[in-house]
Amino acid sequence: MPSVVWTAWRHLPLVQELPEKLLQEQLDGGQSFRWQRLADGTWRGVLGACLVEVRAAQGGLDWRGRQGQLVAERMLHNYFDATGGQAVAVDQLPWRSDPVLAAAIKNFSGLRILRHDPHETLIGFLCSSNKRILQIKVMVAALARTMGEVVVDDYHALPSWSRLARATDAELKACALGYRAAFIRGTAQRLEARPHWVEEMQKLSTPDLLIELQTLPGVGPKVAACVALFGFGRLESFPVDTWVVQALASAYQLKGWKPEQLAEFGRMHFGEAAGLAQQYLFAAARAGLLSVPAEVKPRPLKRKSKQSPKRRG
DNA sequence: GTCCAGGATTCAG
DNA sequence: CTGAATCATGGA
């Protein structure tokens, strides 16, 4: 029996609006795996230990939380980039000389990188390899339901690393993680011994952060890039997944390029907010907007010559 | 039944 | 070093 007592709906102004169609892409487009759309278009999600609902509204979002938890407004303000800082970053992307990017931005105008919690981001993307977004959501929900603390009713927070580290085989099996169960457990065992890992990694430069994340079990280049981008807000991080490989191959004439080469291209071509550009291209590719190669090709970029790998102590 | 999924790891060459 | 095989699971 439901026991959630909601606050009244409140308005959260956003410099960049999020109309319903864009809100869908924003909350169900592979950045977060914790939101579900209700029948009336409202989105319900658990962020940290907060159960919240949001819905599109003129000038921003309407939102509500559990009674007595108006503090969630501050979190949502940051989560959705209410001040529009990313609008400035988008304008600094090379869309004026890149018709592919310009079209993607136009189609998803206002799309932003959500500012997710690093812990929750890492759990989500540890589950992401070789899985579709819908299936990732199922796995993450199972982790919460099985081992996460109750927030209210059937809504659970995501489990801590220490809880995940002592998960039984049966518990992990119940989450249908497949071979990713070893990733979750392995990373949990590493990070439970490091309670301040977020603060420590936040201090690192983005290249060092990516290297550090990749020392964790189940974290390779792509997952590390996603955690850096969505979890640590590093807008220059450029994840290369199957969609981006496809998008760059068809729309940028980069067929046959390997992921690492494409990541280098992305950083060089798109610059400081490459990850933001990546999200626009990702959305456009998934929407089938890049299936036909662009007529105008951007100026070709020379391949970088191989460089010896950096050794670190 | 076959193929693929916001890949990472391990193994062969 | 590079490229291929393998991983567990569910949906199309």
Image (cartoon, coloured by chain):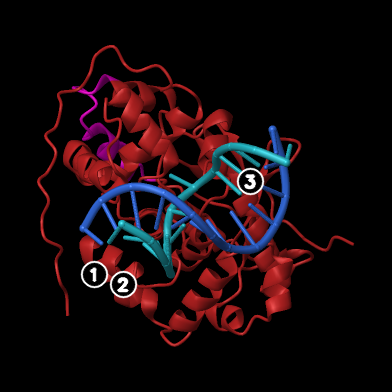
Chain colours: A red, B cyan, C blue
Q: Amino acid at mark 3?
A: Leu
Q: Badges 2 and 3: C-beta atoms under 8 Å apart? A: no
The CA distance from mark 1 to mark 3 is 32 Å
Chain letter of mark 1 equals A
* Closer-to-camera residue (A55/A171): A171
Residue A273 found in image quarter: top left
Residue A194 drawn at (x, y percent): 41, 84
Give the residue pinned by disc 2: A201
Residue A87 drawn at (x, y percent): 32, 37
Name the mark on residue A204: 1
Give the residue pinned by disc 3: A134
* Closer-to-camera residue (A112/A226): A226
Q: Amino acid at mark 1?
A: Leu
Residue occupying the point 53% across, 51% down: A130
Residue occupying the point 31% across, 37% down: A277
Relative placement, left or right, of A176 versus A32 is right
Q: Say which element carries label 3.
A: helix
Callouts 2 and 1 on one subunit: yes
Residue at the far right: name it. A1
Q: Quadrant of the N terminus of chain A?
A: bottom right
* Mark 1 vs 3, N-terminal side: 3
Q: A222 above or below A244?
A: below
Chain letter of mark 2 equals A
